[in-house]
Structure formats: C-alpha cells, structure tokens
Amino acid sequence: MRRFEGKDLLVATHNTGKLEEIAVLLKPFGIAVTSNADHGLPEPDETETTFVGNARIKAHAAAKATGLPALADDSGIEVEALGNAPGVYTADWAETPQGRDFEMAMTRVWTELEAIAAPAPRRARFCSTLVLAWPDGHDEVFEGVVKGELTWPMRGTNGHGYDPMFVPEGYAETFGEMDRWEKNKISHRADAFAKLVAGCFA
C-alpha cells in the first residue's frame, strides 16, 4: 500500500460539508485540503455502476487535471428488500428539474417497501468508497459501511440525504436527529476514513 507523503491533498468534491468533514479528519497530519471548486474543476460524469467505479472516475480526473493527489468519495444507501437499490443511484432518486429533493426520494423508498409488503425490520446500510489517486495513475481503495434499519415517518432535520429515515444499529435516533459530529464518528464515511488513515497516513 502506498503511503501519502505530501502536504497538499485535493478532495474531488463541490460539497462543502464533505470537504469540511475531511479537512477535520486530516488536520492531525498537517495536510492542507482543497476542493474541485478551488481549482475550477467540473464534476466528471459518473458513468460506472459501482461506488468504487464512480469514486475512481472523480479521483483520477482531479489528479490528472491538477498534478495533485486526489481523494474522492462515492456513497449511497442500499435497501435490502429492494435488492440493494437505490445504491449508486441514491442521488438520482432525488433529482428533479429544480434540484435534489430527498424528501421525495425517501418517500419513494418507503412507498416501494410498502408496495411489496417488506417485513420489519426493513434493513439498510449506508456505503462509502474512498479512492485516493496519484497523478501517476496509482490508487488505493477503502470501503466503509454502517448498518441499520429504516423508519417512517422520517425524523430529524440534521444531516442530509436519507438520514431522517435511517436508524443505525445500536441507536434509537435517526441520523437526521443526531448531532452532526456524533453521526460523523459512526458513519460509513468514518469507517472508510479509519481504513484510509491506517493505510496511507498513520
């Protein structure tokens, strides 16, 4: 496994919340973090059908364009009774002509579960795949998950995406009800990051 030796890392995202979360995690290593927006980079088309495939597209595009090592994340929710849908199409289920509507997406998930009379508990998991890519084309891959079950009606206004309908294992609150930093300690991204740090930074 290749260790990260530099001091500058490009996080291949336009999501400021994700950038802030990653910057906090890497701060102990003295690494300066920038984003796609800082470099004027567009979002590449995500044409793969797996989390790792799409994360690789984003990481390698950014590394190639800037000559900097780049870290990309692709993540989503997999619902067991729906054959692990929406999966890589997690954000697509929320797309509208006016932007993303995750309340609509969560309603679709629950409606589809009701339509097939899926038994309780309605199991689901959030998945995160991190790809750290270097300008020479090398990459390292780290995958994280957090398991739980879905609840309805949705609860909480914190977090983002499908958080208000997801209750992680061992907790009574949804991700939407949890404090952001508390959630970040147990999230799928935290799991993947722990593996990234152990593999490339520690």
Image (cartoon, helix red, strand yellow):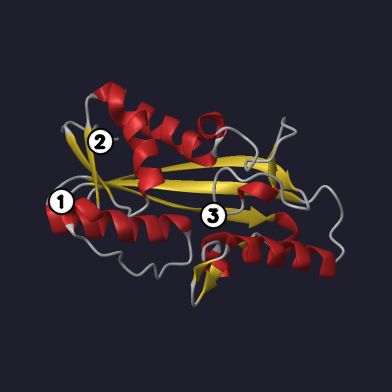
In primary-sequence order, the first of circles 2 and 3 is 2
In percent of width and height, residue 21 lies at 40, 37
Q: Secondary structure at mark 1?
A: loop
Image depth: mark 2 or mark 3 in front: 3
38 relative to 87 in the view: left or right:
left
Measure how far apart labels 1 and 3 are at the Cα level.
28 Å
20 relative to 110 in the view: left or right:
left
In percent of width and height, residue 191 lies at 50, 34
In primary-sequence order, the first of circles 1 and 2 is 2
Image quarter (top left, top right, bottom left or bottom right) of the N terminus = top left
Residue of label 1:
136
Residue type at mark 2 is: Arg
In primary-sequence order, the first of circles 1 and 3 is 3
Residue type at mark 1 is: Asp
Crowd around label 3: few <14 · some 14–19 · many ≥20 (10 Å): many
In percent of width and height, residue 200 lies at 30, 31
Front residue (pair 85, 33): 33
Q: Tell me the residue at 53%/40% (across/down).
A: 188
Residue of label 3:
76
